[in-house]
Every structure is written in C-alpha cells, then in structure tokens.
Image: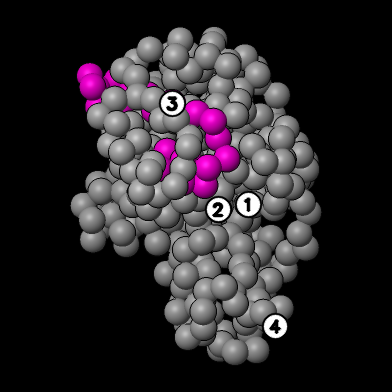
Amino acid sequence: MKVTVVGAGAVGASCAEYIAIKNFASEVVLLDIKEGYAEGKAMDLMQTASLNGFDTKITGVTGDYSKTANSDIAVITSGIPRKPGMTREELIGINAGIVKTVSASLIEHSPNVIVIVVSNPMDTMTYLVHKTTGLPKNKIIGMGGALDSARFKYRLAEALDAPISDVDGMVIGGHSDVGMVPLTSHATRNSIKVSEFLSEERLQQVAEDTKVGGATLTKLLGTSAWYAPGAAVSGLVQAIACDQKKIFPCSTLLEGEYGLDDICIGVPVILGKDGIEKIVDVPLSDAEKTKMQESAQGVRKTNGLLEL
C-alpha cells in the first residue's frame, strides 16, 4: 500500500505522521515544491519510527511526481492556508490552479489512484478534480465532513461533560463556516439522543461553535489547524487501504441523492478498497433539508468562480 501526500506543510506532514503511526501502509511519499522541505520532514518523521513503533517508509521528494508512481491513494493538501479573517472561499483563485496541476501530475503516474482532496475551498476543489481528470466518481473524495464531525463531537462532549468516546454525531453539507449542517437530531450519547441531556438552546450553541471550529483555531493559531485535519485524513486513508467499510461524511459528486445534482458536497458514504462504495441516505428533518439546500447554494456560488 503506497500513499502519496502532496504538500509537506503542517497539514501534509500531520497526515503522513498519523498514517505512518497506524502502520498499515508500506510507503508514504511526501511531496512539496520547496527544495528539500519534504525530504527534511520525511527524515524527521523517520527518526521517530523506532520511538513510535512503525515500519512504514516515509520518503520526501521535491516536485518529482515519478517518485509517486503506482500510488494507491493520494492526498492533496497543497495550496495556501487560511489566515485570520479569511474564508475558505477566498483561497479559490490560487488553489484551483495548484489542485488542477497536482491532480493531473498524480494521475499521469498513478492512473488508478484514489484522490482525497483537502485543499480549500474543499467542496469546490473536489468538484474541480471531477471536472478536469476523468477519474470515476468513487475515486474522488473531499475531506471535510470527517474533520467537522470530530469538531462536533468535541463540542458535544464539552457540553455534556462526557467522555468523547460516549458521544457520536455527524456533520454534512458544505465545508464552510456557514455551509455546515451539524445533525443535532441524530447526535447521541451512548445511543441516547443528546436532546435528552441538552436544551435546544445549548444544542444550537454546539452547532454554531462547530461551524466556526476552523475559524476559531485560525484566529488563535494565526494559520489553519493541522492535528485534527491530519488525523481526519488518516482515518479516511485507513478505511480505504484496509477495506474497512466505515461510514464517514465526505464530499462526493451527487447525481440526485439528497435532491442535489452536479455538485460535490458532504454526505455520509461507506469507504472501502474502491473508495466511495455507497452514498448513505440519512433521513433529515425539514429544517435540516432546508439548511442542506442553502449549503448547496453556497457551494454552487463558489463553483461558479472556477474557470473550467
């Protein structure tokens, strides 16, 4: 199992670290355009192998996509990160060009690769990969919902004063501060609906805190977060590599599901060795359906900025 991570910045290096520590891949290739940067990150990570008990080989390369040949899975994290006050949508001009070039270079050397898009604005970048590469839809996955759901569960556990292992919840919709749809009606604490423990007002606060989870961290850190995004990516990669058939909310091309067409947006999917193996239809309340439609409108507006 060979995994390529394009972009050796904080998010990309975090992806490589979590994938390696889980010890399911034979090789991780870390690629960056900055001379020596990926090589340095790879060497640093490899020097943790004996300490963290993994045998995954991590290789760093500068701009040489031939070293990524025959990758089973590729993760695209490259592009400029958010700065305080920036929306994900404001990154589109620069990041669209980068993602288009990177995806074409990856597929040239690994025609059967499964691509996971992390670069922002993520739903639109996922749509761009669909429109420009010709890969089958099951092999193009946008990573946003897994991260947003982790942040949702963190906020739920905080509100419940409960261990996070007791909590389950999911966020669908667009990966943006206004587009996320935290499914509070489906959230549970050890199979009991969280509405049994929390007031409607507190649940609404949890949802709002979840939606600005990335912006909150960007304000505190001065740049985008990296630990949770890296862990979220590693979860998707492992589900595919190990054929786990796990359900994650991911941005995928919809063709009528959820009443939406010709759009990439976050919905629950089953991930296995073929990538997205099934889109899962979750019953939504009228309010959630309305929010999903509004979220889709926002994603379409951003998609309209693409020069396809």
The local crowd at label 4, few if under 14, some if 14 to 19, many if 20 or more residues have their Cα within 10 Å, is some
First along the sequence among labels 2 and 1: 2
Residue 155 visible: yes
Residue visible at 56% across and 48% down in the picture? 235
The one of 186 and 4 positioned closer to us in this rendering? 4
Q: Amino acid at mark 4?
A: Ile
Camera-nearest label, 2 or 3 = 3
User: Are dots 2 and 1 in contact, CB under 8 Å?
Assistant: yes
Q: Earlier in the sequence, mark 4 or mark 2?
A: 2
Of the residues under marks 1 and 3, which one precedes in the sequence? Answer: 3
Q: How far is mark 3 from mark 4, CA to CA?
A: 43 Å
Q: CA distance from mark 2 to mark 1?
A: 6 Å
Residue 29: numbered disc: 3
- Left or right placement of residue 258 versus residue 58 in this view: right
Could you classify mark 2 by the number of other residues whose Cα lies within 10 Å: few (under 14), some (14-19), or many (20 or more)? many
The earlier-in-sequence mark between 4 and 1 is 4
Disc on the earlier residue, 3 or 4 = 3
Q: CA distance from mark 4 to mark 2?
A: 22 Å
Furthest toward the front, the residue is 50
What residue did someone put label 2 on? 146
User: How many labels, in total?
Assistant: 4
Alpha-carbon distance for marks 4 and 1? 21 Å
Q: Nearer the viewer, mark 3 or mark 4?
A: 3
Report the span colored magenta. 15-38
Describe the colour scheme in one phrase. Answer: one colour
Instruction: Name which residue type carries label 1.
Output: Pro
Residue indicated by mark 4: 192
Residue 3 is situated, as x and y percent measured from the top left of the image, at 52, 29
